[in-house]
Amino acid sequence: MRIDALRARHVLVGDEVVPATLVVRDERIAAIEPYEHPTEGVVVQAPDSAYVVPGVVDTHVHVNEPGRTEWEGFLSATEAAALGGATTLVDMPLNSIPPTTTVEHLQVKQSAALGQLMVDVGFWGGAVPGNVADLEPLWRTGVFGFKCFLAPSGVDEFPPLAPDEFLLALREIARFDGLMIVHAEDATVLEAAPSPPSRAYADFVVSRPPAAETQAIRQVLDGARETGARVHVLHLSSARALDMLADAKAEGLRVTVETCPHYLTFAAETIPDASPQFKCCPPIRDAGNREELWAALREGVIDCVVSDHSPATAEEKHRGGGDLQQAWGGVSGLQVGFAAMASEARSRGIPLAQVSRWMSRHTADLVGLTAKGRIEVGADADLAVYDTAAPFRVEATNLAHKNPISAYDGLTYDGRVVRTVVRGNAIDVDRPDHDWGRQLLRG
């Protein structure tokens, strides 16, 4: 339903939580009034125990449609997003077939999304060997940047860039001031690491050592230094790269960094063996490493937190019968990420306002969506109502994700999103029943 106002005792406006009535007009926040402000029309009243925060802007989601829609699709992914408080997604260019590496392939993706979006969705392009000439046309068409791999991606149709190819693509992207986002694991280091068949999670972690990340990030930073390009390090898992990244920022390189809720929630030593729902690349590391990532978030070395929702079918996740070298790597957490982060942050004395900055404002700013990720006059009326008195027991079979597999299965959080508003359209998370989303283009 379209609303005219949302009233709550706790509204995150800027860096402050205040009682307020948000007046909505033409899909935007038209005014921020005192709590008691009289308002006509459809007014949603949030529970007194709830916080109204900007809708999450999740810039790292693998929707997989078309081509691998049985893994996930626009309808299921955007419903999961809405149920978890995300009002905007940016879809990754791989795992779908065809990958988003040409304008024609982007148009295939856009056609597949028609009529299926519960939240707003934008698109990343891809940088692969041989498509340098496609990068600027994709940028002009409206992708938000370009993803590349420096090691095999896991799917043959999206190969990695060799060092010379990476530098060539980076020079081209710098020329039109685009953005390169990088899966930063080094192929040479991975090839040298032991990777025998094993059901042990500890063996899987050894097969993806921290050196793979640090070596690849060094290559990314050297490329940024040489070309002047904007670069973004995806899903940072290893704390050993933090000093290098901090130094690069102090130097003035245009580099930003993300990590994910699963790296901030779990620890390798507590993950059961033969549990592919926890497998992702780079891997979840130990508890000490996790706490260093939290410290880097507080210090601003890491800029933002995204889901890296990368689902697959049960057949793919359980390939190899528990052998983690064979199982598909990816954590399904789109619907759970905000609740998990809010709970983990609270246990560390970190306010919800800071979590919102990491997951909404900073991600929106990363892709230039300056009307999203914030509650201010003129911004899109994208809102999440997070109720601290509404327990959330995660059951994979009850998530909107197409395949009921999740590392968060069985966990209980002491708060959940009870209402999501997409550009002034209120979605009942217990009965999501409408297609509110639109496709977004850069600029």
Image: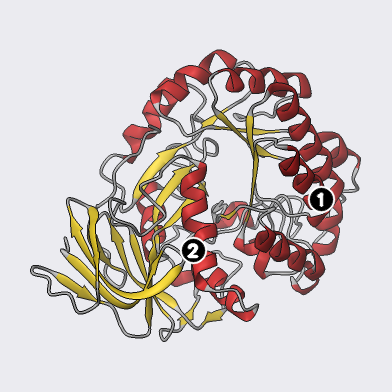
Left of 194 or right of it: where is 292? Answer: left
Q: Nearer the viewer, residue 14 or 352?
A: 14
Placement of 22 over or under 48, stated as above or below: above
Count of marks overlaid on the render: 2
Q: Is residue 134 above or below residue 367?
A: above
* Residue pictured at 56% horizontal, 73% vertical: 409
Q: Quadrant of residue 108 in the image?
A: top left
Residue 129 makes an appearance in the image: no
**Which mark is drawn over residue 146?**
none
| Above or below, comparing residue 87 to residue 391 in the picture | above
The quadrant of the picture occupied by the C terminus is top left
Across and down, in percent, residue 73 comes to 41, 48
The front one of 332 and 123 is: 123
- Residue 364 in picture, x, y percent from top left: 46, 48
Q: Amino acid at mark 1?
A: Asp
Q: Quadrant of residue 132?
A: top right
Dot label at residue 243: 1
Q: Earlier in the sequence, mark 1 or mark 2?
A: 1
Residue that appears at 17% across and 64% down: 3
- In this picture, residue 249 sits left or right of residue 111: right
Q: Is residue 344 above or below residue 162?
A: below
Q: Which residue is painted at 44% across and 82% down in the image?
A: 388
Residue 219 in sight from this viewpoint: yes
On-image quarter of the N terminus: bottom left
Instruction: Report the residue that reaches farthest toward the top.
Output: 133
Of residue 72 and residue 424, the one placed in the foreground of this image is: 424
- Numbered mark located on residue 356 in the image: 2
The 10 Å Cα crowd at callout 1, few under 14, some 14 to 19, many 20 or more, is few
**Amino acid type of disc 2?**
Ser
Q: Which of the 4 image quadrants contains residue 426?
A: bottom left
Circle 1 SS class: helix
